[in-house]
Image (cartoon, grey):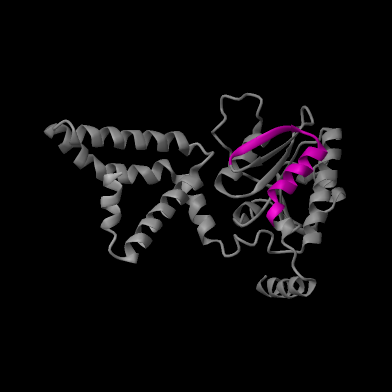
Amino acid sequence: MANLLWYLERLDDWLDIVDILLVAVIFFWVLYMVRGTRAVPLLRGVILLVIVVALLGSVIRLRAFSWLIQNAIPALLVAIPVLFQQELRRALERLGRAGFLLGWAKGERADLEQMLEALSQASHKLSERRSGALIVLERETGLQELADSGILLDAAITPELLLTTFNPNTVLHDGAVIIRSGRVLAAACVLPLSTAFLADRELGLRHRAAIGVTEESDAIVIVISEESGTISIAHNGRIIRNLDSKRLEAVLRALYQPALELSWPRWVARVRQIFTDREQ
Protein backbone atom coordinates (compact mmCIF):
# COMPACT_ATOMS: atom_id res chain seq x y z
CA MET A 1 0.00 0.00 0.00
CA ALA A 2 2.86 2.37 0.84
CA ASN A 3 4.48 1.70 -2.53
CA LEU A 4 1.18 2.47 -4.30
CA LEU A 5 0.87 5.80 -2.50
CA TRP A 6 4.48 6.59 -3.36
CA TYR A 7 3.79 5.97 -7.06
CA LEU A 8 0.62 8.10 -6.93
CA GLU A 9 2.52 10.98 -5.34
CA ARG A 10 4.93 10.99 -8.28
CA LEU A 11 2.10 11.72 -10.75
CA ASP A 12 2.76 15.43 -11.02
CA ASP A 13 0.99 16.12 -14.28
CA TRP A 14 -2.20 14.91 -16.01
CA LEU A 15 -0.01 13.79 -18.90
CA ASP A 16 1.37 11.06 -16.64
CA ILE A 17 -2.14 9.67 -16.22
CA VAL A 18 -2.72 9.85 -19.98
CA ASP A 19 0.61 8.07 -20.50
CA ILE A 20 -0.39 5.22 -18.17
CA LEU A 21 -3.83 4.89 -19.74
CA LEU A 22 -2.31 4.81 -23.22
CA VAL A 23 0.06 1.99 -22.27
CA ALA A 24 -2.83 0.10 -20.64
CA VAL A 25 -4.96 0.49 -23.77
CA ILE A 26 -2.13 -0.83 -25.95
CA PHE A 27 -1.68 -3.91 -23.76
CA PHE A 28 -5.45 -4.49 -23.70
CA TRP A 29 -5.64 -4.13 -27.50
CA VAL A 30 -2.81 -6.64 -28.03
CA LEU A 31 -4.39 -9.18 -25.66
CA TYR A 32 -7.80 -8.66 -27.25
CA MET A 33 -6.42 -9.25 -30.74
CA VAL A 34 -4.78 -12.57 -29.83
CA ARG A 35 -7.47 -13.98 -27.54
CA GLY A 36 -8.84 -17.31 -28.70
CA THR A 37 -6.11 -17.72 -31.33
CA ARG A 38 -3.08 -19.98 -31.63
CA ALA A 39 -0.92 -17.05 -30.53
CA VAL A 40 -2.06 -17.35 -26.90
CA PRO A 41 0.33 -20.24 -25.98
CA LEU A 42 3.18 -18.42 -27.75
CA LEU A 43 2.41 -15.19 -25.92
CA ARG A 44 2.20 -17.06 -22.64
CA GLY A 45 5.59 -18.62 -23.31
CA VAL A 46 7.16 -15.24 -24.18
CA ILE A 47 5.79 -13.65 -20.99
CA LEU A 48 7.03 -16.56 -18.88
CA LEU A 49 10.46 -16.31 -20.50
CA VAL A 50 10.63 -12.57 -19.80
CA ILE A 51 9.68 -13.10 -16.14
CA VAL A 52 12.28 -15.84 -15.67
CA VAL A 53 14.98 -13.74 -17.33
CA ALA A 54 14.08 -10.70 -15.21
CA LEU A 55 14.24 -12.73 -12.01
CA LEU A 56 17.53 -14.33 -12.91
CA GLY A 57 19.00 -10.98 -13.91
CA SER A 58 17.92 -9.09 -10.79
CA VAL A 59 18.07 -11.71 -8.02
CA ILE A 60 21.01 -13.80 -9.19
CA ARG A 61 23.95 -11.89 -10.64
CA LEU A 62 24.91 -14.04 -13.59
CA ARG A 63 27.21 -11.98 -15.81
CA ALA A 64 27.55 -14.39 -18.69
CA PHE A 65 23.81 -15.10 -18.72
CA SER A 66 22.98 -11.39 -18.58
CA TRP A 67 25.36 -10.73 -21.48
CA LEU A 68 23.70 -13.48 -23.52
CA ILE A 69 20.21 -12.13 -22.85
CA GLN A 70 21.18 -8.55 -23.71
CA ASN A 71 22.57 -9.67 -27.05
CA ALA A 72 19.58 -11.94 -27.75
CA ILE A 73 16.98 -9.18 -27.29
CA PRO A 74 17.39 -7.78 -30.85
CA ALA A 75 16.88 -11.26 -32.28
CA LEU A 76 13.80 -11.69 -30.09
CA LEU A 77 12.34 -8.44 -31.39
CA VAL A 78 12.72 -9.80 -34.93
CA ALA A 79 11.27 -13.20 -34.00
CA ILE A 80 8.09 -11.83 -32.40
CA PRO A 81 6.64 -10.41 -35.66
CA VAL A 82 7.44 -13.71 -37.37
CA LEU A 83 5.70 -15.76 -34.67
CA PHE A 84 2.66 -13.48 -34.55
CA GLN A 85 2.52 -12.71 -38.27
CA GLN A 86 -1.14 -13.65 -38.84
CA GLU A 87 -2.35 -11.98 -35.64
CA LEU A 88 -0.45 -8.75 -36.36
CA ARG A 89 -1.73 -8.70 -39.93
CA ARG A 90 -5.32 -9.17 -38.77
CA ALA A 91 -4.95 -6.48 -36.10
CA LEU A 92 -3.52 -3.96 -38.56
CA GLU A 93 -6.28 -4.77 -41.05
CA ARG A 94 -8.91 -4.08 -38.40
CA LEU A 95 -7.19 -0.86 -37.45
CA GLY A 96 -7.01 0.29 -41.04
CA ARG A 97 -10.61 -0.41 -42.00
CA ALA A 98 -12.57 2.74 -42.53
CA GLY A 99 -15.93 1.27 -41.63
CA PHE A 100 -15.06 -1.35 -39.05
CA LEU A 101 -17.42 0.23 -36.51
CA LEU A 102 -20.33 0.33 -38.92
CA GLY A 103 -20.70 -3.39 -39.59
CA TRP A 104 -22.73 -3.95 -42.76
CA ALA A 105 -21.97 -0.60 -44.38
CA LYS A 106 -22.38 -1.60 -48.03
CA GLY A 107 -26.06 -2.42 -48.10
CA GLU A 108 -29.36 -2.09 -46.36
CA ARG A 109 -30.65 -4.27 -43.59
CA ALA A 110 -33.24 -5.80 -45.92
CA ASP A 111 -30.47 -6.90 -48.31
CA LEU A 112 -28.63 -8.56 -45.44
CA GLU A 113 -31.79 -10.34 -44.29
CA GLN A 114 -32.39 -11.57 -47.85
CA MET A 115 -28.80 -12.82 -48.13
CA LEU A 116 -28.97 -14.76 -44.85
CA GLU A 117 -32.27 -16.35 -45.84
CA ALA A 118 -30.94 -17.35 -49.28
CA LEU A 119 -27.82 -18.87 -47.74
CA SER A 120 -29.88 -20.85 -45.23
CA GLN A 121 -32.21 -22.24 -47.92
CA ALA A 122 -29.39 -23.07 -50.31
CA SER A 123 -27.32 -24.75 -47.59
CA HIS A 124 -30.29 -26.90 -46.55
CA LYS A 125 -30.91 -28.13 -50.11
CA LEU A 126 -27.22 -28.66 -50.81
CA SER A 127 -26.96 -30.69 -47.61
CA GLU A 128 -29.92 -32.85 -48.63
CA ARG A 129 -28.39 -33.48 -52.06
CA ARG A 130 -24.91 -33.98 -50.57
CA SER A 131 -23.47 -31.51 -53.01
CA GLY A 132 -20.13 -30.19 -51.79
CA ALA A 133 -20.06 -26.41 -51.47
CA LEU A 134 -17.75 -23.66 -50.27
CA ILE A 135 -19.33 -20.21 -49.79
CA VAL A 136 -17.17 -17.29 -48.67
CA LEU A 137 -18.82 -14.16 -47.26
CA GLU A 138 -16.50 -11.21 -47.71
CA ARG A 139 -16.67 -8.60 -44.95
CA GLU A 140 -14.22 -5.75 -44.33
CA THR A 141 -11.08 -7.50 -45.58
CA GLY A 142 -11.06 -7.47 -49.37
CA LEU A 143 -10.79 -10.82 -51.18
CA GLN A 144 -10.36 -9.50 -54.70
CA GLU A 145 -7.20 -11.48 -55.42
CA LEU A 146 -9.04 -14.69 -54.49
CA ALA A 147 -11.98 -13.65 -56.64
CA ASP A 148 -9.62 -13.06 -59.56
CA SER A 149 -8.55 -16.72 -59.38
CA GLY A 150 -12.09 -17.80 -60.35
CA ILE A 151 -14.83 -16.76 -62.77
CA LEU A 152 -16.37 -13.33 -62.18
CA LEU A 153 -20.19 -13.39 -62.03
CA ASP A 154 -21.48 -10.30 -60.18
CA ALA A 155 -24.99 -11.73 -59.86
CA ALA A 156 -27.74 -11.36 -57.28
CA ILE A 157 -27.60 -14.09 -54.67
CA THR A 158 -30.46 -16.59 -54.82
CA PRO A 159 -30.79 -20.20 -53.64
CA GLU A 160 -31.28 -21.30 -57.26
CA LEU A 161 -28.01 -19.69 -58.36
CA LEU A 162 -26.04 -21.37 -55.57
CA LEU A 163 -27.67 -24.75 -56.28
CA THR A 164 -26.82 -24.45 -59.97
CA THR A 165 -23.26 -23.33 -59.29
CA PHE A 166 -22.48 -26.27 -56.99
CA ASN A 167 -24.18 -28.85 -59.17
CA PRO A 168 -21.55 -31.56 -59.85
CA ASN A 169 -22.43 -31.47 -63.55
CA THR A 170 -21.45 -27.81 -63.94
CA VAL A 171 -17.99 -26.41 -64.58
CA LEU A 172 -18.11 -23.95 -61.66
CA HIS A 173 -18.84 -26.47 -58.88
CA ASP A 174 -15.17 -27.12 -58.09
CA GLY A 175 -13.98 -24.19 -55.99
CA ALA A 176 -15.40 -21.49 -53.77
CA VAL A 177 -18.08 -18.88 -54.31
CA ILE A 178 -17.24 -15.42 -52.98
CA ILE A 179 -20.11 -13.16 -51.93
CA ARG A 180 -19.64 -9.41 -51.61
CA SER A 181 -22.36 -7.01 -50.42
CA GLY A 182 -25.13 -9.52 -50.98
CA ARG A 183 -24.05 -10.41 -54.54
CA VAL A 184 -22.19 -13.43 -55.89
CA LEU A 185 -18.90 -11.87 -56.95
CA ALA A 186 -17.11 -14.92 -58.38
CA ALA A 187 -17.23 -18.72 -58.50
CA ALA A 188 -14.66 -21.53 -58.85
CA CYS A 189 -12.19 -19.55 -56.73
CA VAL A 190 -9.05 -21.06 -55.23
CA LEU A 191 -8.55 -20.58 -51.47
CA PRO A 192 -5.44 -21.03 -49.32
CA LEU A 193 -5.30 -24.20 -47.23
CA SER A 194 -4.82 -24.18 -43.48
CA THR A 195 -2.15 -26.29 -41.80
CA ALA A 196 -3.57 -25.88 -38.29
CA PHE A 197 -5.63 -29.10 -38.23
CA LEU A 198 -3.43 -31.59 -40.07
CA ALA A 199 -3.96 -34.21 -37.36
CA ASP A 200 -7.74 -34.11 -37.81
CA ARG A 201 -8.40 -36.57 -40.63
CA GLU A 202 -12.13 -35.77 -40.68
CA LEU A 203 -11.41 -32.39 -42.26
CA GLY A 204 -11.19 -32.47 -46.05
CA LEU A 205 -9.76 -29.94 -48.46
CA ARG A 206 -12.94 -27.82 -48.39
CA HIS A 207 -12.81 -27.51 -44.61
CA ARG A 208 -9.09 -26.71 -44.63
CA ALA A 209 -9.64 -24.08 -47.30
CA ALA A 210 -12.45 -22.56 -45.24
CA ILE A 211 -10.24 -22.33 -42.17
CA GLY A 212 -7.33 -21.05 -44.25
CA VAL A 213 -9.15 -18.02 -45.66
CA THR A 214 -10.58 -17.12 -42.23
CA GLU A 215 -7.09 -17.19 -40.74
CA GLU A 216 -6.00 -14.46 -43.13
CA SER A 217 -9.19 -12.35 -43.16
CA ASP A 218 -12.42 -11.64 -41.28
CA ALA A 219 -14.47 -13.61 -43.82
CA ILE A 220 -17.18 -16.11 -42.88
CA VAL A 221 -17.20 -19.40 -44.79
CA ILE A 222 -20.00 -21.96 -45.13
CA VAL A 223 -18.91 -25.52 -45.97
CA ILE A 224 -21.14 -28.36 -47.17
CA SER A 225 -19.53 -31.80 -47.00
CA GLU A 226 -19.85 -33.85 -50.17
CA GLU A 227 -19.47 -37.15 -48.31
CA SER A 228 -21.83 -36.65 -45.36
CA GLY A 229 -23.81 -33.55 -46.31
CA THR A 230 -23.05 -31.91 -42.97
CA ILE A 231 -23.00 -28.11 -42.75
CA SER A 232 -20.07 -26.29 -41.13
CA ILE A 233 -19.17 -22.64 -40.68
CA ALA A 234 -15.68 -21.19 -40.27
CA HIS A 235 -14.72 -17.82 -38.82
CA ASN A 236 -11.58 -16.36 -37.26
CA GLY A 237 -9.58 -19.54 -37.84
CA ARG A 238 -12.17 -21.75 -36.13
CA ILE A 239 -14.81 -24.10 -37.48
CA ILE A 240 -18.21 -25.17 -36.13
CA ARG A 241 -19.38 -28.47 -37.55
CA ASN A 242 -22.57 -30.56 -37.71
CA LEU A 243 -25.03 -27.71 -38.14
CA ASP A 244 -28.50 -27.80 -39.62
CA SER A 245 -30.05 -24.96 -41.61
CA LYS A 246 -31.70 -23.37 -38.55
CA ARG A 247 -28.53 -23.43 -36.47
CA LEU A 248 -26.57 -22.12 -39.45
CA GLU A 249 -28.90 -19.15 -39.77
CA ALA A 250 -28.67 -18.54 -36.00
CA VAL A 251 -24.85 -18.50 -36.14
CA LEU A 252 -24.85 -16.18 -39.15
CA ARG A 253 -27.24 -13.81 -37.42
CA ALA A 254 -25.04 -13.82 -34.34
CA LEU A 255 -21.99 -12.92 -36.43
CA TYR A 256 -23.92 -10.19 -38.27
CA GLN A 257 -25.77 -8.97 -35.17
CA PRO A 258 -24.13 -5.49 -35.10
CA ALA A 259 -25.09 -4.97 -38.74
CA LEU A 260 -28.64 -6.20 -38.20
CA GLU A 261 -29.12 -3.80 -35.29
CA LEU A 262 -27.82 -0.89 -37.38
CA SER A 263 -30.84 0.59 -39.14
CA TRP A 264 -30.08 3.19 -41.78
CA PRO A 265 -32.80 5.44 -43.21
CA ARG A 266 -33.67 4.42 -46.75
CA TRP A 267 -32.51 7.71 -48.28
CA VAL A 268 -29.11 7.33 -46.58
CA ALA A 269 -28.75 3.83 -48.04
CA ARG A 270 -29.63 5.15 -51.51
CA VAL A 271 -27.01 7.88 -51.30
CA ARG A 272 -24.41 5.36 -50.14
CA GLN A 273 -25.33 3.08 -53.05
CA ILE A 274 -24.87 5.95 -55.53
CA PHE A 275 -21.38 6.69 -54.26
CA THR A 276 -20.51 2.97 -54.23
CA ASP A 277 -21.58 2.63 -57.87
CA ARG A 278 -19.48 5.64 -58.83
CA GLU A 279 -16.41 4.18 -57.13
CA GLN A 280 -16.85 0.93 -59.02
Location of the N terminus (image quadrant): top left
User: Which residue is nearer to you in this view: 131 or 70?
Assistant: 70
Q: Is residue 142 magenta?
A: no
Image point (85%, 46%), residue name? 164
**Left or right of 122: which side holds 16?**
left
Q: Position of residue 19 (x, y in %)?
A: 35, 60
Q: Position of residue 109 (x, y in %)?
A: 77, 61
User: Which residue is nearer to you in this view: 248 or 165?
Assistant: 248
Q: Is residue 243 magenta?
A: yes
Highlighted magenta segment, given as a residue range: 237-258
Location of the C terminus (image quadrant): bottom right
Image point (31%, 46%), residue name? 77
Total count of labels: 0
Can residue 175 be seen in the rendering of this structure?
A: no
Q: Position of residue 244 (x, y in %)?
A: 80, 35
Q: Position of residue 172 (x, y in %)?
A: 76, 46
Can residue 260 be seen in the rendering of this structure?
A: yes
Image point (27%, 57%), residue name? 9
**Left or right of 39: which side holds 121?**
right
Write down the quadrant of residue 230 in the picture.
top right
**Left or right of 81: which side holds 232?**
right
